[in-house]
Image (spheres, helix red, strand yellow):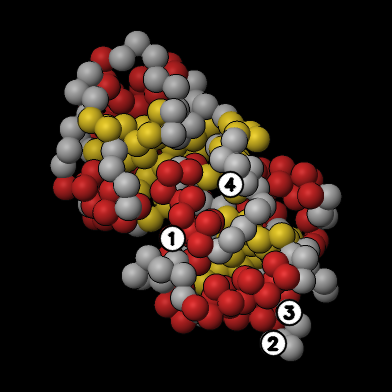
Amino acid sequence: MSYKLIAVDLDDTLLNSRLQISPRVKNAIAKAVSKGLYVVLCTGRILKGSRRFYDELGLQTLMITTGGAEIYDSGGKHVYSHNMDPAVVKKLIAFSQTHGVHFQVYMNGELVYREKNAYSESYEQANSFTGTVRPDLFELERIETPKVLMIADIGRMDALQASARKEFPMLSVRRSKPTYLEFSSLDVSKGDALRFVADYYGVDMKDVVAVGDAEIDIPMIKYAGLGVAVANAVPLVKQAADVICASNDEDGVADIIEEYVLGGTE
């Protein structure tokens, strides 16, 4: 099989636990690009939190962000975007208040939340950028955002996700991390975004590799000709994958590129 495009999630997949791209992974990606492969980052992060990794790798491809709700070109311009229904966003605010969980949105490329707390600070630290405090966020008449993120302690997440899926059947409700619950329109996913990008480059689905670790990666893993879960992926992702590679701390992405893209010759 001669694969032509590889889509890679960032957190806990491409990035190791120190939030870095290892030299071996970086080298494997550079060799793949030199052989004409399209390497596409496909992340739940917004552009502001992911662009530095794209630049570090020297990529020129489209970049999928915000869990598939936004796609950017190499110049940082929107190629595709899909905001949520503002009326539904208001209902999500009420849901977050009822359950007492942290709520944040992404407006005009900026992280926005009502107040600083331990959850917002942890998110900012992990993503290396600062959000904007809007004390009036919950009172805004209309919020235009591609996704909503709620953050809660891990022990609450199963019940919170179950309640959210029951109350919001019109939304995609998936975890991007054990403590992150992401909400987006049903017709938005990393899988749909990857299909858009593959079509853009004229690449058939059988020639696509997708690598991820979290629930929001499942659609792209199922879409790809070769769906890959890193060893540290959650069980649902492993079940959806065709192949399980080494963990993000063991250069799993490099293993996949070397074996399936470079043919084991590197």
**In the rendered structure, are the residues bearing label 3 and label 4 in contact, judged by CB atoms less than 8 Å apart?**
no
Residue that carries the numbered disc 3 in the rendered image: 262
Q: Amino acid at mark 3?
A: Leu
* Residue 44: assigned label: none
Circle 3 Cα neighbour tier, 10 Å, few/some/many (<14 / 14–19 / ≥20): some
Question: Is 68 placed left or right of 266 in the picture?
Answer: left
122 or 58: which is nearer to us?
A: 58
* Residue 266: assigned label: 2
Q: CA distance from mark 1 to mark 4?
A: 14 Å
Residue that carries the numbered disc 1 in the rendered image: 11
Where residue 124 appears, as percent x and y from the top left, is: 28, 48
Circle 4 Cα neighbour tier, 10 Å, few/some/many (<14 / 14–19 / ≥20): many
**In the rendered structure, are the residues bearing label 4 and label 2 in contact, judged by CB atoms less than 8 Å apart?**
no
Q: CA distance from mark 4 to mark 2?
A: 28 Å
Q: CA distance from mark 3 to mark 4?
A: 24 Å
Residue depicted at 52% across the width and 27% down the height: 83
